[in-house]
Amino acid sequence: MIDPNNEWAEQQLAKLHAQATTYPTQALLRAARQLVVAQDQRLDQLRGELDGRMWSPQKW
Amino acid sequence: MKTLVVVGHPRLGESTTQQFLKVAASECANVTWHELQLPFEVTQEQALIQQHDRIIVQFPLYWYSAPAIMRQWFDEVWRMPLTTGNYRLLRGKQLGVVVTAGAARNEFQAGGKQGATMDEVLRPYQMTARVTEMEYLPALPIYQFNYLSEQAKQELYITYQSYISNPEHGHFAGLEQWLLARLDLLVTTMPDLAPVLAQLRANQEELTDIAQQVKWMRQEDDE
């Protein structure tokens, strides 16, 4: 995970998932964990692309 | 959006997969669970289709096709007056397929044990959607349900719910929006979730912003 806030969120969701007593809640919290991981990845990729395009030698 | 889930299974009571999906569907608003039983009251069946926006046909794969009861439902119900006037009563609706298979996912490919992809097997549904000007949703095949790990089952539970109830199923932003709305409902019973959700929402906003910036830059670079 790139963003420490997302790492924290993922850990919290893991804890809540372990405490969840019903199946639907467990399933939903698992999906939320996957979501934060995907968000973190996408943000990293998009930031990378933005950076790459801003500093492209074609623009020098 | 209203969804009709049409379940065609000759031995429904014995199917753990269908029971699992039924529980998942029962949690979703605006979803009608409809188990096919003979004989069909054609007028009622046609009215049900008309009253819903997303039609999901759900069945186990028998000899690379739907069980007889599902086949019969199409033969008897998908005809006049439902199909009258250039299919105007069906046009614009969505058609999705939830198919369960006893074989493994990797068997369904050219060169694999089954020799064809699931999309090829389901081609008649795609063609039906095409000719009636319905939007065909990418199918949701469920392979070897009984061998799925607990984690995979939980993932399927949510994927299935999204498939039947998320208007933007299949798009990341749509999944994000749909999941966050579902999670919001949990906060009252799970207060510790609130700050976590705030983080997920902040990510969602940033993703929207940065995706827009990237889009502009791509356009600029293309010029």
Image (cartoon, coloured by chain):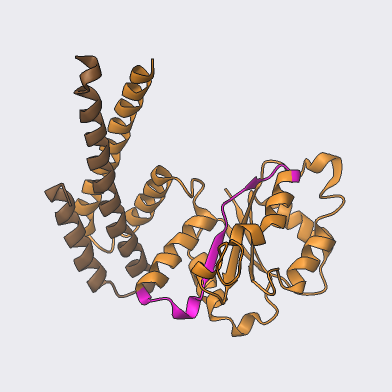
Chain colours: A brown, B orange
* A25 relative to B169 in the view: left or right: left
- The image quadrant where one finds the C terminus of chain B is top left
Question: Which image quarter: residue B204?
Answer: top left
Identify the residue at image location x=29%, y=31%.
B209
Residue A14 place in picture, x, y as percent: 22, 65
Q: Residue furthest bottom?
A: B14
Q: How many marks?
A: 0
Residue B69 higher or lower than B83, as above or below: below
Q: Residue furthest front?
A: B111
The region drawn magenta spans: B131-150
Identify the residue at image location x=18%, y=52%.
A1
Frontmost residue, B126 versus B115: B115
* B214 relative to B131 in the view: left or right: left
Question: Which image quarter: residue B117?
Answer: bottom right
Identify the residue at image location x=82%, y=66%.
B41
Q: Residue furthest left?
A: A4
Identify the residue at image location x=47%, y=49%.
B170
Residue A41 higher or lower than B141, as above or below: above
Q: Is residue B115 shown to the viewer in this render?
A: yes
Residue B177 place in picture, x, y as percent: 38, 46
Residue B42 among magenta residues: no
Residue B63 place in picture, x, y as percent: 70, 74
Q: Is residue B26 shown to the viewer in this render?
A: no
Frontmost residue, B197 versus A30: A30
Residue B141 among magenta residues: yes
Residue A3 place in picture, x, y as percent: 15, 47
